[in-house]
């Protein structure tokens, strides 16, 4: 759980300008379903707070034995994203506010999400 929770907190990036300042030039841009998006490739460790809830439930239901699977899996993800990089997609509304964030196709959004990876 600590590995998934650690890293950069992307919930602080709320506008397109902040995202561009933080990550630089996007590797791709476009529109999907009337909303614009920007794609970035990063090797930074990104915090994944939505996964913590599921991990907490599985650890509680398995009396901690689930950690035998989850810890090596998290180490694998950390290594893969550090070596190969991770694919980040930020989805924006028409005012340039972040409405959704995806890491390797999985939602990282912190609240109501719109859009797809």
Image: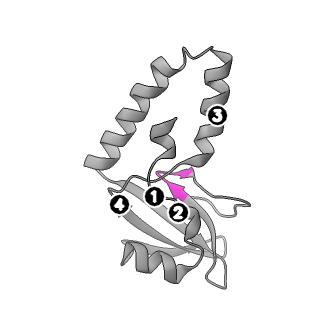
- Residue 95 x, y percent position in the rendering: 66, 85
- Residue 29 x, y percent position in the rendering: 46, 75
| Sequence-first tag of 1 and 3 | 1
Rounded to the nearest whole Å, what is the CA distance between mark 4 and mark 2? 13 Å
Vertical order, 40 against 24 (above or below): above
Rounded to the nearest whole Å, what is the CA distance between mark 1 and mark 4? 11 Å
- Residue 41 x, y percent position in the rendering: 36, 62
Which residue lies under the disc numbered 4? 42
Crowding at label 2, few (<14), some or many (≥20) Cα neighbours within 10 Å? Answer: some
Q: Which mark is residue 54?
A: 3
Callout in the foreground (1, 4): 1
Q: Residue furthest right?
A: 112
Which residue lies under the disc numbered 1? 8
What secondary structure is marked by label 3?
A: helix
For the C terminus, the quadrant is bottom right
What secondary structure is marked by label 1?
A: loop
Whether tag 2 and tag 1 are in contact, CB under 8 A, the answer is yes
Crowding at label 3, few (<14), some or many (≥20) Cα neighbours within 10 Å? Answer: few
Q: Residue at x 42, y 74 (%)?
A: 22
Q: Residue at x 41, y 57 (%)?
A: 87
What secondary structure is marked by label 4?
A: strand
Residue range in magenta is: 102-106
Which residue lies under the disc numbered 2? 10
Residue 12's image quarter? bottom right
Residue 15 relative to residue 27: left or right: right
Callout in the foreground (1, 3): 1
Q: Which mark is residue 53?
A: none
Callout in the foreground (4, 2): 2
What secondary structure is marked by label 2?
A: helix
| Sequence-first tag of 4 and 2 | 2
């Amino acid at each position: 759980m600590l590995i998934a929770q650690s890293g950069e907190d992307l919930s602080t990036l709320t506008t397109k300008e902040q995202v561009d300042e933080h990550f630089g030039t996007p590797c791709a841009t476009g529109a999907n379903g009337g909303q614009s998006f920007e794609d970035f490739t990063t090797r930074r460790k990104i915090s994944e707070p939505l996964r913590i809830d599921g991990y907490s439930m599985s650890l509680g239901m398995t009396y901690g034995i689930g950690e035998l699977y989850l810890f090596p899996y998290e180490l694998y993800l950390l290594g893969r994203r550090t070596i190969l990089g991770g694919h980040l997609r930020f989805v924006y509304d028409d005012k340039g506010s972040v409405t959704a964030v995806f890491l390797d196709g999985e939602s990282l959004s912190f609240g109501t999400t719109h859009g797809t990876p």
